[in-house]
Structure formats: structure tokens, C-alpha cells
Amino acid sequence: MVQSSVLGFPRMGVLRDLKKANEAYWADKISQQDLLAEGKRLRLAHWKIQKDAGVDIIPSNDFAFYDHVLDHIQLFNAVPERYTKQKLSPLDEYFAMGRGHQKGDVDVPALEMVKWFDSNYHYVKPTLQDNQTFSLAQDPKPVREFLEAKEAGFQTRPVLVGPVSFLALGKPDRGSSVDPITLLDKLVPVYVELLKALKAAGAETVQIDEPVLVFDLRPEIKNAFKPAYEAFAAQGSAIPSIVVATYFGDIVHNFDVLPAFANVQGVHVDLARHPEQLEPVIKQLGPNQILSAGVVDGRNIWKNNFQKSLGLLQTAIKALGPERVIVATSSSLLHTPHTLASEKKLPADVYEWFSFASEKVKEVAILAKAAIDPESVRAELDANAAAMKARAESTRTNDPKVKERQEQVTDAMHHRKSGFETRYAQQKTHLSLPLFPTTTIGSFPQTSEIRVQRNKFTKGEITEEQYDEFIKKEIDLAVQIQDELGLDVYVHGEPERNDMVQYFGERLQGYVFTTHAWVQSYGSRCVRPPIIVGDISRPAPMTVKESKYAASVSKKPMKGMLTGPVTCLRWSFPRDDVHQSIQCQQLALALRDEVVDLEKNGIFVIQVDEPALREGLPLRKGSEREAYLKWAVNSFKLATAGVEDSTQIHSHFCYSEFQDFFHAIAALDADVLSIENSKSDAKLLKVFIDESYPRHIGPGVYDIHSPRVPPEEEFKQRIQEMLEYLRPEQLWINPDCGLKTRKWDEVKGALTHMVNAAKYFREKY
Ligand code: GLN
Ligand code: ZN
């Protein structure tokens, strides 16, 4: 028999129940007991979905109120003293680390939160001290939740983040210099104690996640696996059997680590992402070891291609025998929405192409049966084949016109007519810009009035004309305020945009939208990415109406505002049937037409935002990363290079760590770059001199995440610092990012100081 297994289930519930409960608890609207009860209800419901689907190996301890890495910080009593000393309840201490705590006389900021591998989920970074100690928390969560499941009739496999990954994903706390991996021998005994407790509670197997195995690892980390897993092996049957899980990459480059797992029961690999690692991995397994084959993708929303998965499973079964193969999700299903059943508005044909978490668990169970006895699930296999065929042949998927256009893309289309010097000379006269030009990044406050009107329009309570009138009034207001502030390049304020990707997706052919397909991004925050289902094209201009109107009421250059192709791709669920580079090029061509249309309509400054360019970077150095950089940069260039020399192309990035990414940013050939910088050392800008960067740069001069209005002096100081690294003609003055989350009085206050500071330097130079 082949078993089926799920590595983790989304936590939010059908209607983002966990988000609602958490937020109600934070707002003191429900009690701690209520919240704990809601957590239990969700766990039980999620176990039941998996059991009803016929899954053999169901995870526990995959649930977390905020984040599963944060759970482990508390589980190992690795909570920094600034939290423990507040004497909060364990749950409040936990949330304090996740999101900060400001109540009564307690005021502690959150721990750092960063992206989980290359996903859009964020985890809380373990923050460790020079004299760090670890011990097992009382009533450890994995044991508690295992027993909770058991009592309800579910035999589960607890999931733990492994000791090497836990440390490798951590960092030294402020003021400490400890290399976290050196703490391994202090941490391993705590794992042993936990594993013993799980065994005593009745756990037969545990899943230990060591996802760092997909990275390029330094020797200290590689060498840490052996002592850790040897210590576990030494416990013999006093602890459960272990399946080591990896995901989001292949582990072939780390095969020299595998002897460390000689005594574990099995290894899980991601075959959705890297099917080619199957045969090499099979060769590495010990004579009795199990392969957990991650064939059902935990990162997307597509129905599994059973034929393809069964091909992989047959290879594994042939080599290992059915008893040594487990059919699994490629990773936790945390990154997929809860259930397709909630979607009532999807086109009927497209509905058949999708599979969310509750459907994917069924796929795993069906595949396990099909691998041994296809006839027992003939109907399911036939239905799957029919869905695959319908999708492959759908006119929605294939648009010959788009393909034809892609074939006609030439190298020349990626390059502006002239080099920057020539372009700049023309732009300077065409736009009559002063030294130290001031601008903003695009959005102005999204007031509650804007949201109310947008909602009314979506619900059909006001007509399109009424809504358009409202948007025009908002643009008028934005222009009037920019007049008063004395900015140099205006923006229309983006009042008509609900979201920077969805807005474009809704205007492009090839996208569909869901109503409930929320995915956890961090804590209680969820995102609902649009889905790319087919070849992308632009039936009509998307932003020209608003930008043209804004330009018509403005006496200074109006900046057109677009979301770049890479960001549109990364913040959507992409297709899995064509390479992402192809989808990105289609987006680029659609945006290229938009850029040219804006120019035709009198918009001569156009900003194409690419905040997601960096997060798409493949996890490992080497050919995959090089290839990504090439197509990502080319897509941006293709989108923007269709304009005359006198039109100025801007781009914007919301991160400041661009040193190792500098060449990609430089290769975009944007006339002006705005980057987040206000919280970083101005020294970071040195890379622009070191690399003799010729074009113009607007490093953010103030933090837009905070309501604080910095005094004029602070702006002057900041600009002065920047001038140590940038030439005066090179420097633009702008905030870190868009202002949509701020209030108008904060915006006016800060921008007044910003413009005054720019004027001060204009006089000086
Ligand atoms: N133009 C967008 C805005 O100002 C940019 C947002 C972003 O970079 N995330 O809101
Ligand atoms: Zn930004």
C-alpha cells in the first residue's frame, strides 16, 4: 500500500475565521478563552477535512495563532528578556513578539519578520543571545495538540521545524554577536526531550522540517546536521520515527549532508518544483528508507496533473516498492486558499481547473490509491484527464494573437532610442525640471470616503458616471494640494486603485479573480492574489483616462503610474503550464502599449513600479538566478523602452538592501529610480558612486510607515548625507514609498518640510 500525506494545512479557516478571532482578541472584544476555543475549533475542522478526504498521514502542530516559527521560539523558551520581563500571559507574550505590545506601561516592538523562503508568507526570526539557553516550555504545544487530535479520534504526525533550520533561520539579537548555529548542542537536548514526550503521548512518527537544505549552505550549517540527527538516532525507540522534510527547491547540491539522516525513517522532497531530483534522491536513500514524494503543489491553486504525478510515483515505486513511497503535498498547504467550494463567481470552465487546500488533500489520497490500483479510482482519473485536456485546449489559455506578438519581439524593442545622456538633455528642456526635483511615489491617502464610494460602485449602488465624477474630484484635490505644496512632478494620487496588481489584472485579458481565496501573508494579514489563467493581453488602455484628466488640470508634469510586469506576475498566482518568463513577457507587452498610450496622451513622465523584482530571485546562486535576472530585467525594459528620448521613465523599489542586487537595478536603464532609504544608513548609497551609476536616484527621505511628521531640519540633514554619495544633478527628493496609508494632515506636514528642504539645497547649489 502507498500512503498519502499532507505536510500542513492553512490555518485561517473558510472565512478567514482565525484572522477575525485574532483581531477581535487584540481589540479586547473577545477573551483569551474565546480565542483559544476558536483555535481548537479550527484545528478539529481541518483534521476532519483531511480525514474525510482519506489522507493517511495528517499533520498536527501545523496550526499557529500567528506563525509556526514563533511557536518554536516560545516552545524552546528562546524568548528575549525584553518580552519575558513584562510578565504577560504566554499568549500575550507570543503576540508581543509577533506584532509588538503597547498597552498600559508595556511598550515593546515586534521581533523582525521576513519572507519565508521565496513565498509571500512571513515568519518571525528567532533572535538569539550570546548567552542563549534553551529549555522545553511547560505543556509543550506539539504534545498538547497531538493529544487534542488523539482525543478527537485523529492519529496525527506532529510537525516540527528542525533544529538546524530553526537556528539557520535565526539571527543574533541586537548587541549580540552569536552565530546561531553554534548554539546547536544546547538546543538538541531540548528536541530530544520534546521527541520523548511526543512518543510517550503516542506519536509514532514526526515530520521534522529542514527546508534550509534547499539553500547553498555554509560548512558550519552543513556540519550541524550530523551531530543533531545522531543524537536523535541514539534515542532508539524512545522517540518517534522521523521523516525529514525539505521543500521549495531541490537538495541535490546538499547530498553530502544526507549521511546525517542515515537513521531516519524517510526523507520528503519537493517534486512539484523539482521533479528531476527524484532519481538522484532515490539513489541516496538507505535500504529501508521511505521517500515522501511531494507531487501535489503546496504553492499554487492548480489541479494536479494526475498523469504526470503518477509517472513520478511509478518511478519511485518501481525502485523502492509501494511500502517505501508516500504520496504527499510538495510543502505545507499554508500557501494555498482554504477551499474552492467558496468560489461562486468563477467562470464554470475555469472552476474545473483549480484545486485549493481542501481539494488538494483529496488529490493526495486519490493518487495514493491510483498508484497501486488505478481502476479503484477510474472515475477520478478520467475526470482529471478531462480537466487537463479542457484547460490545455481552452481559448482562454491560448491566444494565437499573443503568441504571434511574442514571436515578433526583437532585441531592439528592449532598448531606448538613445543612451541616458542624450535622453536626459531632452527631458530636461521638455520637462523644465529644477535641480533636486521633488515628487511622490504615486498614491495619496486612501480615505474612508474613497473606500465607501468604491464599494458603492462595485455593488452597483452608484453609476459609472457618478463614480468617475467622484474620482475626478479626488484627482482635483490631489493636484490642488500639490500646487500648494510646490512639488515639481505631480501624481494623480491613485484614488481609483484598489490594489496595485488587482487593478491591472481586472483590466487585462487572461486573469480571473476569486472572492474567498485568501492566503496568509503574516499574522492575521491575508492576501487574495488574482490568478493568471491564460495568455495575457490588454483589450483597452487601463490608466490613460485618469492620468490624462490629471494632466489636464495640472500645470506641472504629471507622472503616469503603472505596476511593472514582474510585480504583476509575482503578486498573482501564475500559470503552471507555461514558464513564468513567458507570462512576464506577455505582461510586459501589455504594459508597453500602456506606456506608449500614456505618452501619446501627453504623459511624459511614467513610473513603472517593481517592488517585487527582488523577491522573485531564485533561492540559490547560479544558472537559475542568472536566468531569472535576465528575463525579469528584459520584461521591464520591454515594457518601458517604447517611448521617445524626451519621455522620462521612473521605477520604484520598496527595499533598501540593493547592494547585491545593484546590477539588476542598473540594467533596467530607468531614467530615475526611487528607493526606500530613510531608515537605512546613507552609506548604502555609496554603491552608486562605486559603480559610477550615471542616472538619477531618489532615495526616500522619510519613513511613510509612521504617522510622524519629521521636522525640516531632519530632511535637510538627510539630504546633506545623501549628497556625500550622490552628485547634486543626480538627486531627486521624494518619500520612501506611496502615501496611501497616511492621513492628509500628515502628508501635507511632511511634504511641506520636504519641499522646503529641497528649495534650501537648490539655492545653495
Ligand atoms: N505607486 C505605488 C504607491 O504609491 C507604489 C506602491 C509600492 O511600491 N508598494 O502606492
Ligand atoms: Zn514602495
Image: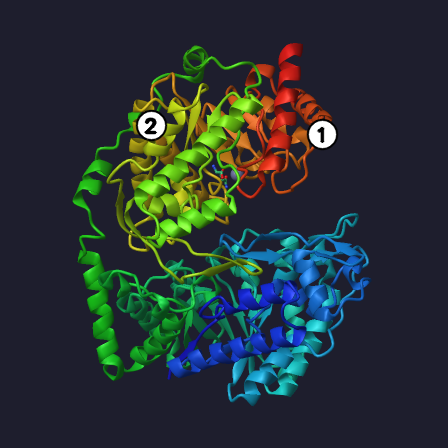
- Residue closest to the eye, 595 or 468: 468
Q: Is mark 2 within 8 Å of ligand 1?
A: no
Q: Mark 1: give few (<14), some (14-19) or many (20+) Cα within 10 Å.
A: some
Q: Position of residue 437 (x, y in %)?
A: 54, 19
Q: Residue at x 34, y 29 (%)?
A: 595
Q: Is residue 549 above or below residue 126?
A: above
Circles 1, 2 touching at the beta carbon (< 8 Å): no
Q: Position of residue 653 (x, y in %)?
A: 51, 36
Q: Residue at x 39, y 76 (%)?
A: 320
**Residue 582 occupies quadrant:** top left
Residue 598: assigned label: 2
On the picture, is 450 further left or further right than 97? left
Q: Mark 2: give few (<14), some (14-19) or many (20+) Cα within 10 Å.
A: many
Q: Position of residue 112 (x, y in %)?
A: 66, 52
On the picture, is 551 further left or further right than 753? left
Q: CA distance from mark 1 to mark 2?
A: 37 Å
**Mark 1 or 2, nearer chain start:** 2
Residue 711: assigned label: 1
**Residue 167 occupies quadrant:** bottom right
On the picture, is 440 further left or further right than 637? right
Q: Is residue 386 above or below residue 653?
A: below
The kind of residue on which mark 1 rests is Pro
